């Protein structure tokens, strides 16, 4: 059967029988590439048996979820408590950030109880051994396979039946059923689909490493993230020693958990107290510096928010953020101008979350506003004060979830005062912390600045 020519978008995976300058699905220009589609008979088989029958959900026999510990507690936390047998996990991040290092260390721990397979498509076996010696990774049951052919990888896994498999990386793997080059949309899609069927059919968990684009997204079609069970992203700067592992998709656990690591000469080391790490170099009595408490799954993080407000030398003032949403900052600046009377229209505003953390919850609103106001007025916020609260467009300070663990974490690190929404004071007891409640932004500014 003759193969058919098709065109696929490298951004979203949209397929078209003819070339298009602009993708109708995602709107990207010049992303359609020509590929050869394999006939249906050359594709992988089915995941389920032909004897599968439909039944009421209550009659489906339960299956115990026996997770395997990876030997790295921060990785187990992000995975939801460990590695689920038969799961397909995709891990992405910038080049050199530590993806291969983390997986090689995890395979070292898993190999203590059985054989594991590390498939390297980018390095030779000798290069992988050199990296393993630097990390202190060894063992007769940690097997390294330098291979790019998908058929050879699957055949080796079926013969060996390891506890876990790592494919580093999915963009280097190719299948003989397609004529397109490795890393193309069809090759990545087909390889990921075959590995997913291998994992589900054998019960062997599979890690795949994915390259990222200049925008930070997993390279290849978005369908790659839909195929896998879990998507993990490594965040951080290669010039910065700290790394944050975050789950953006997890069928077996929460996507709110994060793992914190520190990159050293001997590999990645777990950080048991991230709050202390993020505040270790905090300046004393510095205007524009405010500490807030953020919830990341079951973990409470204390992070420092830094703001710098200065007169603009350009026609349009800049609003630059690192670690928070820039649109959120623009909203809060508008509330400061309207409700607090601060004239920020001609000011450049720079906001940064120190330590490389990223804040997504609205509980950091009040701290962000106080950091901007502190820098603008050149008045420092008291050092032993922690701030959290959501801010509305009317200038009101709204209650946040779980204030108790936020205050408890602050007490552990020596903070003695907490500025929080009045709505959170109903069921709270001081417990060694001075609690100051506010209901409006104006009250918060008068109290601290």
Image (tube, rainbow, N blue to C red):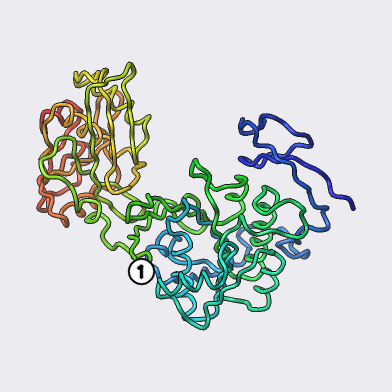
Residue 213 placement, left or right of 399: right
Q: How many numbered discs?
A: 1
Residue 125 placement, left or right of 390: right
Residue found at x 18% / y 35%: 288
For label 1, the crowd category at 10 Å Cα-Cα, with few meaning under 14, some 14 to 19 and many 20 or more, is: some
Residue that protrudes farthest toward the top in the picture: 315
Query: Relative to residue 332, is residue 237 depicted above or below?
Result: below
Residue 44 placement, left or right of 214: right
For the C terminus, the image quarter is top left
Secondary structure found at label 1: loop
Q: Percent from the top left, x then y, of residue 112?
A: 46, 80
Task: Name which quarter of the figure residue 362 lies in.
Answer: top left
Residue that protrudes farthest toward the bottom in the picture: 140
Confirm whether residue 160 shows in the render: yes
Residue found at x 34% / y 41%: 323
Front one among 256 and 4: 4
Query: Relative to residue 93, is residue 133 depicted above or below?
Result: below
């Amino acid at each position: 059967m003759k193969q058919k020519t098709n065109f696929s978008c490298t951004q979203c995976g949209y397929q078209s029988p003819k070339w298009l300058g602009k993708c109708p699905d995602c709107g990207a220009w010049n992303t359609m590439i020509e590929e050869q589609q394999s006939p249906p008979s050359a594709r992988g088989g089915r995941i389920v048996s032909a004897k599968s029958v439909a039944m009421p959900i209550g009659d489906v026999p339960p299956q115990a979820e026996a997770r395997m510990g990876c030997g790295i507690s921060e990785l187990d936390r992000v995975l939801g408590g460990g590695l689920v047998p038969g799961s397909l996990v995709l891990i992405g991040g910038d080049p050199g950030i530590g993806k291969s290092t983390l997986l090689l260390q995890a395979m070292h721990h898993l190999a203590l109880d059985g054989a594991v397979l590390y498939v390297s498509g980018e390095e030779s076996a000798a290069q992988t051994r050199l990296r393993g010696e630097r990390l202190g990774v060894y063992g007769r049951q940690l097997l390294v396979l330098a291979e790019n052919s998908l058929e050879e990888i699957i055949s080796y896994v079926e013969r060996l039946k390891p506890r876990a498999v790592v494919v580093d990386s999915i963009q280097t793997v190719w299948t003989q059923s397609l004529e397109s080059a490795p890393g193309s949309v069809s090759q990545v899609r087909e390889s990921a689909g075959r590995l997913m069927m291998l994992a589900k059919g054998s019960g062997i968990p599979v890690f795949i490493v994915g390259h990222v684009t200049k925008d930070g997204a997993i390279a290849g079609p978005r369908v790659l993230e839909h195929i896998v069970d879990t998507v993990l992203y490594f965040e951080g700067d290669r010039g910065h020693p700290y790394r944050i592992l975050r789950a953006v998709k997890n069928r077996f656990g929460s996507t709110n958990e994060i793992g914190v690591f520190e990159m050293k000469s001997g590999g990645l080391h777990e950080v048991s107290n991230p709050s202390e790490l993020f505040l270790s170099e905090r300046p004393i009595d510095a205007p524009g510096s405010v500490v807030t408490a953020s919830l990341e799954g079951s973990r409470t993080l204390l992070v420092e928010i830094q703001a710098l407000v200065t007169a603009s030398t350009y026609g349009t003032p800049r609003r630059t953020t690192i670690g928070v949403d820039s649109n959120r900052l623009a909203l809060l600046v508008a509330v400061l101008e309207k409700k607090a009377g601060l004239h920020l229209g001609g000011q450049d505003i720079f906001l940064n979350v120190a330590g490389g953390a990223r804040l997504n919850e609205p509980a950091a609103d009040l701290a962000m506003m106080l950091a901007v106001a502190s820098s603008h007025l050149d008045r420092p916020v008291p050092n032993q004060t922690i701030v959290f609260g959501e801010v509305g467009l009317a200038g009101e300070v709204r209650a946040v979830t779980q204030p108790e663990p936020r205050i408890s974490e602050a007490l552990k690190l020596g903070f003695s005062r907490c500025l929080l929404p009045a709505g959170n004071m109903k069921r709270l007891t001081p417990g060694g912390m001075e609690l100051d409640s506010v209901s409006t932004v104006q009250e918060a500014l008068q109290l601290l600045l």
